[in-house]
Image (cartoon, coloured by chain):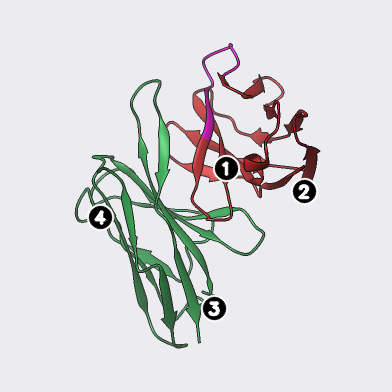
Chain colours: A red, B green
Amino acid sequence: AQTVTQSQPEMSVQEAETVTLSCTYDTSENNYYLFWYKQPPSRQMILVIRQEAYKQQNATENRFSVNFQKAAKSFSLKISDSQLGDTAMYFCAFMKADNDMRFGAGTRLTVKP
Amino acid sequence: DGGITQSPKYLFRKEGQNVTLSCEQNLNHDAMYWYRQDPGQGLRLIYYSQIVNDFQKGDIAEGYSVSREKKESFPLTVTSAQKNPTAFYLCASASEAPGDTEAFFGQGTRLTVV
């Protein structure tokens, strides 16, 4: 089975600054999807951003962008202009073509005022 | 409104008893999932199903069972064989629309063994 590794258990950032969360994955598949999900204290999982492996262009969603390095199997999330509401657990996820979807262990992000 | 409904939100079970967690979706998704989340940890895959009457084991299937008799429903049974069942359980379903693939999650069930 594919594995997803998030090597930063906890991170913090000052409000309005930029932070990057790391994610690496291991797979022999060529077609797959990558995701970043946010889990605030309510524990509701919220999609932050999605990347299709066949697309070379990095996905962006407002203040959120990714750096997708397919050869290196790396998928980092950059949050610009961090806001207090960004405080949450962030999970990197990998989905194969057969819908098998696995998550990393998560990074707890704290945005400080 | 379309979405995923998990019930109940909180569940208490005595040791040695089986218990079933409900998950229903009206999003017309083929794929459905069950994950377990322990405090401060990530989501671990228990089972997933691509279509009706078919499901695959995830990383921690031992002590759990599922069924997929209807597209809308994917119940999870926690059996007495699961040695440490106290955890937060999340159900999800996935859209496979090209360019719009995404997993949608329920609000979770907190299971406590007493």
Of the pair A32 and B35, the residue shown nearer to us: B35
Marks 3 and 4: which is nearer the front?
A: 4
Quickly name the residue at label 1.
A38
Whether marks 1 and 2 lie on the same chain: yes
Q: CA distance from mark 3 to mark 1?
A: 29 Å
Look at discs 3 and 1 and give the one toward the viewer: 1
A45 horizontally vs B79: left or right:
right
Question: How far apart in space, not on screen, are marks 1 and 4 (Cα)?
Answer: 25 Å
Which residue is at 54% across, 21% downward? A53
Cβ atoms at labels 2 and 4 below 8 Å apart: no
Q: At numbered mark 4, what does the secondary structure look like: helix, strand or loop?
A: loop
Nearer mark to the viewer, of 2 and 3: 2
Instruction: Specify the label residue B18 is tagged with.
Output: none
Q: Secondary structure at mark 3?
A: loop
Q: Is residue A98 visible?
A: no
Tell me whether the residue at label 3 lies in contact with that at label 4, contact meaning CB atoms closer than 8 angstroms.
no
Question: Label 3 to label 4, Cα distance in Å?
Answer: 26 Å
**Dot 2 corresponds to which residue?**
A10
Are there few (<14), some (14-19), or many (20+) residues within 10 Å of tag 1? Answer: many
- CB under 8 Å between discs 1 and 2: no
B11 relative to B1, above or below? below
As measured in the structure, the alpha-carbon distance from the residue carrying label 2 to the one carrying label 4 is 36 Å
Between residue B44 and residue B65, name the one nearer to us: B44
- Numbered range of the magenta stretch: A48-59
Q: Which residue is mark 3?
A: B83
At horizontal 72% and vertical 23% (from top left) the residue drawn is: A72
Residue A85 covered by magenta stretch: no
**Residue at the extreme left:** B70
Instruction: Give the residue type that dot 4 points to.
Output: Ser
Q: Mark 4: few, some, or many residues within 10 Å (few <14, many ≥20)?
A: some
Q: Is residue B36 left or right of residue A12?
A: left
- Earlier-in-chain disc, 1 versus 2: 2
